[in-house]
Image: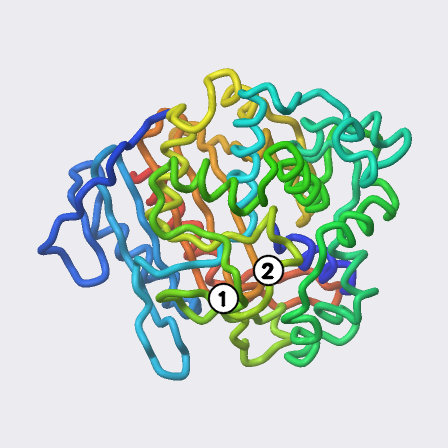
Amino acid sequence: MRLTIFASVAALSLGGCSSATAPDVAEGVPPGSTDTSTGLDPVRLRSALDAVHDAGMPGVFAEVRDGDQIWRGASGVADLETGRPIQDDMLQRVGSITKTFTATAIMQQVDQDRIRLDAPIGDYLPHLVPGDRGKKITVRMLLNHTSGLADYLPTAFPSLASFPSLADVSPESLDDNRFTEFRPTELIEMGVNAPATGEPGSSPGVYSNTNYFLLGELLEQVTGTTMENYIAENVIERAGLRDTAFPDEPRIDGPHSRMYESMYGMIDPPRDYSEYSISWMKPGAGLVSTTADLNRFYAELLGGELVSPSSLAQMQDTVAVIAQDGQTIDYGLGLQRIELPGCGTFWGHGGTVFGALTWSWTRADGKRQMTVAMNLMRWNKLDATGTPQPHPIDDGLSAFYQEARCGN
């Protein structure tokens, strides 16, 4: 059971068109959903979203786009105690979707010849990845998780007075380092010193948040500014995002839901975990955003508005990577690819943190987009072997994903 929980905690940081202006949303549709599209079915989308809430998700909200046509919906509550309804424009901690933003920033520096994709990271950060590993691990390997560097999460937090305590998961253990400000270099050191997951460049790769902390340090070295400032000015602002930022304090500033963590039923009832320092995962999972902003971001990126065509092609060159849940995914440079039979190729990323889950997918032609956010994590209970058991929420989400991405 403990191994399963280790993987789940490590997975917290992890699932072309251009739109110069956001499309308008029509009025006169059912409360909680909006639609201007003949290509989207608002009744079916609304029903599928409600089914996720009815299956046990406290609150879920989404935006689905088909070209200039959009549907937005929200179902359930943002606060279990007060019954405050969830809204479709709320802020959300988006977890590893942040990796696409960080990768985009790195590729902008590649476009300016300040970073070379196949240069050893030791050329830039020899003090962080010294010796032969620094000479063998390239920037590309960090971006696509083939570096062989272990994730610092399962190694680091038990040695840091547990965040959380994996031996005794409880509401109290989740608070042990809730407001601790970790230094990037101490987390990188833990990942670098942990046993390697493979040789640099070996296949399949293994998903590791250590890679993206190193990329954050690389970005700061070559730009002369903080990672947060660079991404804010050159990715977030350039994409025209209004509600996306790295929070500078534990509390989210703006309308948001409480975020409930169940830890596979070990925390019962699930408790709110919406406030904490994100210093333990900032370059890989620190952003707060909205469903509308995320759809716009991926539209801009995949439409060639944020990086050059050659850099976008590099980002979409995928390798096999073992995700923290044990599944093998197709992963590029900060982008994941999925193939949906009869529906097409989609690009995007998923992200989880304690209490929140977000998925954002954009079809390869840029026309169809789906971003969905929810406020409960690890709702599946474990069996005697520590394996998460099926839950009605799983079926509800699967049905909504199908309707949102593919329709009929």
Mark 1 is on which residue type?
Leu
Marker disc for residue 376: 1
How many residues crowd around disc 1 within 10 Å: few (fewer than 14), some, or many (20 or more)? Answer: many
Q: Quadrant of the C terminus?
A: top left
* Image position of 181 with respect to 345: above or below: below
Task: Give how far across and how far down residue 117 sits, in percent.
Answer: 66, 22
Residue 15 visible, this orientation: no
Q: Nearer the viewer, residue 290 or 215?
A: 215
State the mark number for residue 278. Answer: 2
Which of the 4 image quadrants contains residue 65? top left
Left or right, 380 with reference to 191? left
- Residue 321's image quarter? top right
**Left or right for 401, reference 322:** left
What residue appears at the point 44 percent right and 50 percent down from the top-left corner?
398
Report if residue 11 is visible in the image: yes
Question: Looking at the image, which residue sits at the far bottom?
Answer: 81
Q: Is residue 155 left or right of residue 274?
A: right
- Seen at 74% across and 26% down, the residue is 138
